[in-house]
Image (spheres, grey):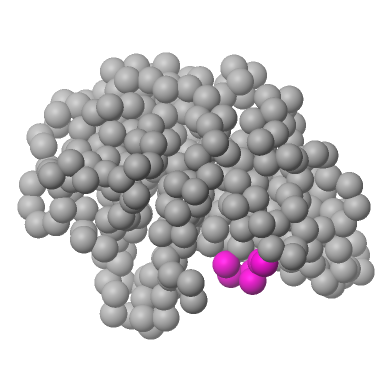
Amino acid sequence: MKAVNYSEGIINILDVPKPSGEGVLVNIDSCGICGTDMHMLNNKVHLSHIAGHEMSGRLSDGTLVAVEPLKYCGKCLQCESGSYNLCAADKAELLGLTADGGMAEQIIVSEHCIVKLDQKINPKTACLVEPIAVAVHGYVITGTRPRHRVAVVGGGSIGQCAVFAAKAMGCEVDLHARYEHQMEAAQLCNVKEPSGVYDRVVDCVGSPDAIQTCVELLKPQGKIIGLAVGWEDIKIPGIAAVNKEASYFTSRCYGLGAEGRDIDIAAKMLFDLPDLASKIITHRFPIDSAVEAFNVAGDRKSGSIKVVLDINI
């Protein structure tokens, strides 16, 4: 079958054996390119396995599903508490980053990875369930509620998903974005440039300038939600943060909260509000054009937000 990986700065389109072994076979429809993929590609990380963790597809009987790309033991203290995203087992994996992922025609995953979708959901947007779940998790661990005012800093794909999830929760949400096309994509959520202060500020950039902006926008005793992957040290401006008694919450993937799995909540949001996701996916490519897809994903001036590989659609 055809598959894609990136390693040492090079995109590879591979011909690999179809997966075999125990688990559930998923025929991949689409797989998104994540900012994490771009960072690892640009930093020439050695990756020996198939890439891709934002995936959706169909079971052998045609059932449409998304995939939660986490392998965990289910037995350690973290797993038993619902924080299986922090599994302590040596064999814990993140599909597409530490094990074979979804940029391929097929994948076999554990039963617990299967995310049941409403079968009327748009299959062309179902791969967004995973990045929306990232945003949901950040809101869950900070106790965010519809009464809270939310500002999102960063208009890339995870920023758009953070706007989407906040809107789906019933929050007032605004967006600080670098590019005009990013603001335009979020207009269905009635966003505007942030003004005043906010109960929650979501960092979807991770740079020192972005953290500074987050603190400036935060109300006293508010919470900053760090959805951006911190590849470098996170530096919080001391006096400004102390004067507001600001809290910074790191957030990793998704887990199980009081209202269920974050990724199941995300799937329902996507089904209930399909129009809000309509502009997040800006470009689609067949798997044979993976090199071009990654090039577009890495060029924000191209107008890209979320770039997706369509594989079996």
Is residue 234 in view from this perspective? Answer: no
Q: Residue at x 45, y 54 (%)?
A: 268
**311 vs 24: above or below:** above
Q: Quadrant of residue 215?
A: bottom right
Residue 271 location, x and y as percent? 45, 47
- The spot of residue 116 in percent (x, y) is 30, 55
Q: Is residue 81 visible?
A: yes
User: Measured along the vertical axis of the image, is residue 287 above or below residue 255?
Assistant: above
Residue at 66% across, 66% down: 144
Considering depth in this image, is 198 or 147 the residue closer to the camera?
147
Q: Is residue 308 above or below residue 39?
A: above
Identify the magenta region.
Answer: 140-145
Is residue 303 located in the magenta-colored stretch of the structure?
no
Instruction: Locate residue 136, reporting x and y percent.
Output: 54, 58
Is residue 141 found inside the magenta-colored segment of the image?
Answer: yes
Which is nearer the eye, 71 or 191?
191
234 or 102, which lies in front?
Answer: 102
- In which quadrant is the C terminus drawn? top left
What residue appears at the point 32 percent right and 20 percent down from the top-left corner? Answer: 286
